[in-house]
Structure formats: structure tokens, C-alpha cells
Image: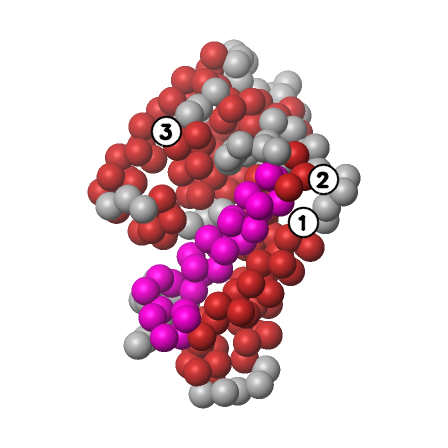
């Protein structure tokens, strides 16, 4: 069975090499997706445990679990490898939160630092401006306001915004992770963006717009 079509050509090639028993292919496959998994972990790690646990350690744990389950993936391949690996990493993160912070399921931490470029671009799009939403608003402050606005959303809305805008997943990939039909995921994303825009305006992010 071939990898799902939403995997990149390079990933599909590496998966074929893993099936064929090429020794270095598995390491290359994990290395190719490590940055994306690390970004996902960093966006969601509870700040209460950041001083005790390195996000890279969570990625390593996820890769070890993925290695254990790799024969199952190669046999079924019902998901793109990228989505499959991400779900394993997310499960590891939830286990970590329960173990260290007794945390309920959360999709973004209150003090998490969102990528400034992604935050700025999202705010500019939502506030209908090509320039920085406020000439007086520093990029770090803008990132903080986007983070605060995200906290005003429901867990479902916040998660799909993170998936699409901060992890760079497609609508189809986000739908698989959320176990939704693609059309339903698309509608939820549209509604979430509208609610995020309202939350940004309520928080004063647009008060200095020209």
C-alpha cells in the first residue's frame, strides 16, 4: 500500500526505501519531519513544565514510539506519514502534561510564545491591512495579543487556527487530525478566523489602524 498522496514526493520516496530495508532511510524520514513536530510541541507545551522538560525530549520520545509502531504504519498507511507522526507526538505531549502538571487537554498555553512572523501575518490578514496593525505595536507585543485573542476562542476553534496558521497544515490534513470531513473543517476554520478577528479587535489590536 502506498503512502497517502498528501505526503511529499521526498517523504514517499523515503517510505519506499524503509519498506525496502534501506538502513539510513528511517533516520532521514524522521529528520525530515523533526522541525515540524518540534514546532507543534513548542506551541502547546504547558509553561509550568517548560523548565523541567525540553521540547526536543518530547520529540525524541515520539520518534521512539513511532519507531515501535512503524511496521503497523507500513502495513496500513491509512494516513499521511506527517499526520500519523504528529498524532503520536501529540499523544506523548498529553501524557507528559498529565504526568507533570495534571493538565486537562489544552491546545495552547497561556504564556506560549507564538512565532512573530506567523502572528503578524495572521493579524494583518484578519484586520484587513498590509502593514503592521499598529505602527506603535512592537512585533513581540503583537504576538502576545494574538496569543491572548486565541485564548478567547473555544478549544476547537483555537486548535484549527494553530493547525492551519502555525503548523502549516492543509485543510485536508487538519480535517484528518480533527476527525472531520474536509468541508466541515473548512467551515470551522472560517468561523474560527471570524471569531479570532473579533477577539483581536476587542483586545485593542486594531485601535491604531489608519
User: Is residue 86 within the magenta segment?
Assistant: yes
Q: Is residue 148 visible?
A: yes
Give the structural element (helix, strand or loop) at label 1: helix
The N terminus sits in image quarter: bottom left
**In terms of image quadrants, where is residue 95?**
top right
Q: Residues within 10 Å of mark 2 (few under 14, many from 20)?
A: few
Judged from the image, the secondary structure of the residue bearing numbered disc 2 is: loop
Left or right of 15? Residue 38 is right
Viewer-nearest of discs 3 and 1 = 1
Q: Does residue 61 lie above or below 198 as drawn?
A: below
- Badge 3 marks a residue whose secondary structure is helix
Residue 32 coordinates in the image, percent (x, y): 55, 67
Closer to us: 64 or 55: 64
- Numbered tag placed on residue 50 in the rendering: 2
List the residue tagged with mark 1: 55
Q: CA distance from mark 3 to mark 1?
A: 27 Å
Tell which circle, 2 or 1, labels the residue nearer the N-terminal end.
2
Residue 161 point in image, percent of width and height: 43, 36
Q: Mark 2 and mark 1: span between their CA atoms?
A: 8 Å
Q: Are the residues at dot 2 and dot 1 in contact (C-beta closer than 8 Å)?
A: yes
CA gap, disc 2 to disc 3?
Answer: 28 Å
**First in sequence: mark 2 or mark 3?**
2
Query: Label 3: which residue?
Result: 192
- The residue at 43%/59% (across/down) is 84
Above or below, 4 relative to 35: below
Residues rendered magenta in the picture: 72-98
Amino acid at each position: 500500500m502506498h503512502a497517502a498522496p498528501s505526503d511529499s514526493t521526498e517523504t514517499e520516496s523515503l517510505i519506499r526505501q524503509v519498506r525496502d530495508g534501506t538502513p539510513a532511510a528511517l533516520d532521514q524520514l524522521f529528520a525530515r519531519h523533526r522541525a515540524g513536530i518540534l514546532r507543534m510541541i513548542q506551541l502547546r507545551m504547558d509553561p509550568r513544565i517548560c523548565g523541567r522538560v525540553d521540547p526536543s525530549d518530547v520529540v525524541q520520545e515520539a520518534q521512539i514510539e513511532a519507531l515501535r509502531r512503524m511496521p503497523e504504519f507500513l502495513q496500513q498507511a491509512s494516513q499521511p506519514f506527517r499526520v500519523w507522526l504528529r498524532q503520536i507526538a501529540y499523544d506523548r505531549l498529553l501524557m507528559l502534561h498529565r504526568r507533570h502538571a495534571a493538565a486537562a487537554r489544552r491546545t495552547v498555553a497561556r504564556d506560549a510564545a507564538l512565532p512573530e512572523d506567523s502572528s503578524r501575518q495572521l493579524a494583518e490578514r484578519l484586520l484587513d491591512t498590509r502593514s503592521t496593525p499598529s505602527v506603535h505595536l512592537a512585533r513581540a507585543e503583537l504576538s502576545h495579543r494574538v496569543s491572548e485573542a486565541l485564548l478567547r476562542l473555544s478549544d476547537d476553534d483555537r486548535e484549527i487556527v494553530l493547525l492551519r496558521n502555525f503548523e502549516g497544515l492543509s485543510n485536508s490534513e487538519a480535517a484528518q487530525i480533527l476527525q472531520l470531513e474536509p468541508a466541515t473543517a473548512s467551515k470551522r476554520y472560517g468561523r474560527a478566523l471570524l471569531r479570532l478577528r473579533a477577539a483581536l479587535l476587542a483586545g485593542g489590536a486594531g485601535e491604531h489602524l489608519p
